[in-house]
Amino acid sequence: MASNDLVNEALMYGDDLRVPKLKKLVTIAGPFNGLQGFLGAQPVPKILKMDYRPVHQTKHFKRMLTYRDHFPKGVQLFNVVGKIEGHFDNDCFVSVNSARSVKYLLHGVLKNYRELLVTGEEDYHCSLNHNPLVFNSVNDFLWTEHPNLPNMQTRSTDAQALESNENKTLATTAV
């Protein structure tokens, strides 16, 4: 729930001058629209073409939408989403749709939105922050002035393949 907490905090206090100015934000597997859409089963290319607007919005998501204009302007967001390969559209806890809905939530207030959809047999919710690709991408995003992070979907097979750069990466625009 940390991703949700960070976004909620920025929605509630983002225009408060007593709070440090947010410039970059990383969210990993955030359940922004609850656990709705958990049982869908779409292939990854179709998921990437889907709209970011949730079909069904939870009460909490609707409340967050009312505070959209309070979110600090000019923030760059890097959103990491997981999908277990061969299963429903989720990372065993959070649906892909719910995690991706943050783009719709913050549309028009973000300076930049980047997304990394990590799919594979080992890419479940609790392991995403241990994935070398995620770790390196987050570090690059946070600590590089102009990170070279294309909007992408990455099919990871295992950590050993990632470390030896044998993973397959497909670039896509997630505008």
Image (cartoon, rainbow, N blue to C red):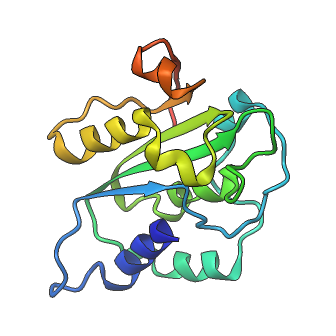
Q: Nearer the viewer, residue 13 or 26?
A: 26
**Residue 3 at least partly seen:** yes
Q: How many marks?
A: 0
Residue drawn at 63 percent across, 37 percent down: 122
Spot occupied by residue 78 in the image (x, y as percentages of width and height)? 39, 48
Residue drawn at 61 percent across, 40 percent down: 123
Q: In the drawing, does residue 131 fall left or right of residue 38?
A: left
Spot occupied by residue 116 in the image (x, y as percentages of width and height)? 49, 38
Residue drawn at 60 percent across, 24 percent down: 157
In terms of image quadrants, where is residue 37? bottom right
Q: Nearer the viewer, residue 122 or 108?
A: 122
Spot occupied by residue 134 in the image (x, y as percentages of width and height)? 42, 39
Q: In the drawing, does residue 146 fall left or right of residue 141?
A: left
Q: Is residue 63 above or below residue 83?
A: below
Spot occupied by residue 11 in the image (x, y as percentages of width and height)? 40, 78
Q: Is residue 129 above or below residue 134?
A: below
Residue drawn at 71 percent across, 76 percent down: 58
Q: Is residue 29 above or below residue 82?
A: below
Q: Nearer the viewer, residue 61 or 85?
A: 85
**Residue 175 at least partly seen:** no
Q: In the drawing, does residue 10 fall left or right of residue 104?
A: left
Q: Is residue 111 above or below residue 131?
A: below
